[in-house]
Amino acid sequence: MNSSDDRKVMAAIIDASFDSLFAIDLNGCIQFANQTAAQVFGYEKEELIGSNISCIVGGGHAASHDGYLQKYKETGVTNLMGSMREVQARRKDGTEFPVKLGIKRVYRQNNDLLVAFIRDITEQKKAEALQSKVQEDQKVRAAILDASFDAMFAINLEGKIELVNLAAIKQFGYDSQEGLVGNNIDMIVGGGHARSHNQYLKKYKDTGVERLMGTLREVKGKRKDGSEFPCIIGIKRVDRNGSSDNPLMVAFIRDITKQKEADALQLRVQEDKSQEDLVGNNIDMIVGGGHATNHDKYLKNYHQTGENRFVGSMREVKGRRKDGSEFPCVIGIKRVNRIDQGNPLMVAFIRDITQQKEMEHLQLALQDERVRSAILDTSFDSLFATSPDGIIHMVNRVAVDVLGYKNENELLGEDVKNIVIGWKGQLKH
């Protein structure tokens, strides 16, 4: 291969490069540019040859570029030579983009050249910016999760813990996330459900049905030391990277121990207040049916004679509430002698039978209605019961048959005059 062929091969190799290549003299005049340079910077190769290299310099340095070269010619010193540097380049249309620049001096007898390799790093910068944003978002989300007062667990469908926040570590009594991450979530499940938890997950994998998903539920949590506590749990499915193949189950867990204690205390206070309203007062305050005024006499008679129809038996009476309303109840009374031989106590158990009585009245009313209907249906005549404006509210069986209807429901609510007039044109009102 002769020298001419060598030059052609070398030129082809240089044009095939993915990087832009420029060769300039020490005055900044472009002596050579490869095909990649022309494409990247938006020029024809012929436009670049003979032009000043400042035409592709961005970042506001184009006007000063000749000065940099003159200083290099005089001192031989430049901080760009022999190193890779990130700078801004400029296309023919004026748009700028980030590049990596590497410069090497090529010594020749008559005129040395500066050879610059330029790599477009636009996509690299986008990727770095995206990665930086993702990392920043991850930090923000992690900070938010760690700032939460509620424990958070993210598990896969095998039940393995993949992520926890600080509240989870503290709430369940662990020293660090290493004590939780990688282990099965059943380690924090209380209430005797730990052994069954993997079955719940398997059922969810097989059917996609989970009764806890998307709801709040009260369950038992279990700490590292084995102690259990009441908590509220909310579970949400999170698909990773938009795919449903390998989702995470994210659970937020709130310890409600203090809430439960406060509720119990409030209940005790309410019970104590309710007792204060009764204890020390005369029992006649809850006696209804007009017997309150005579109740002390009943007790005095029992005290003198030892006889009382109520003691040792169940009896239906009227009770009276604080607001004065009365209700039916069954009462059973028992005498209890004190150990210290003091005055005996009369202990009464009282059961509210309001609902029972209402049911009995309803059954009686239904029975009466059935009897009345049977009597009416045995009549030989058609019977109608209407409101003052003629709307039918009751008919007997004879009327239904005579008028040619299937059942009484077709007549109820109709205007009686329309029924009579329209009866096949055979009757007149």
Image (cartoon, rainbow, N blue to C red):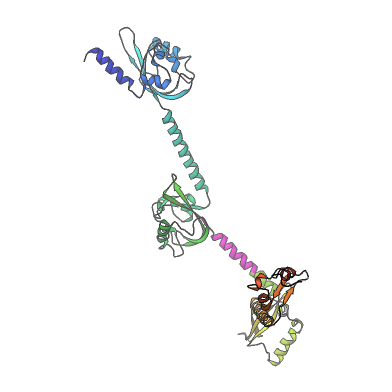
| Direction from residue 164 to residue 366 in the image, left or right | right
Q: How many marks?
A: 0
Residue occupying image coordinates x 68% and y 89%? 309
Q: Position of residue 356 (x, y in %)?
A: 63, 78
Q: Quadrant of the C terminus?
A: bottom right
Image position of 35 with respect to 408: above or below: above
Q: Quadrant of residue 265?
A: bottom right
Farthest residue, direction bottom: 305
Left or right relative to 131: residue 264: right
Question: Which residue shows up at 34% across the image and 15% down it?
Answer: 105
Seen from the viewer's position, the closer of residues 4 and 76 is: 4
Residue 319 located within the stretch drawn in magenta: no
Residue 390 drawn at (x, y percent):
76, 70
Residue 128 seen from this side: yes
* Residue farthest toward the top in the current orientation of the protein: 110
Front residue (pair 364, 320): 364
Q: Which is nearer the eye, 237 or 402?
A: 402
Q: Residue at x 42, y 30 (%)?
A: 123
Check the picture and name the quadrant holding the N terminus.
top left
The answer to whether residue 324 is seen in the rendering is no
Residue sticking out furthest to the left: 1
Would you say the magenta stretch is mainly helix, strand or loop?
helix
**Looking at the image, which residue sits at the far right?**
388
Q: Is residue 267 magenta?
A: yes
Q: Is 173 located above or below residue 389 in the figure?
A: above
The percent coordinates of residue 304 (x first, y second) are 71, 91
- Counting from the top left corner in percent of width and height, residue 367 is at 65, 81
| 238 vs 257: above or below | above
Give, as a single range, the part of the protein colored magenta: 251-270
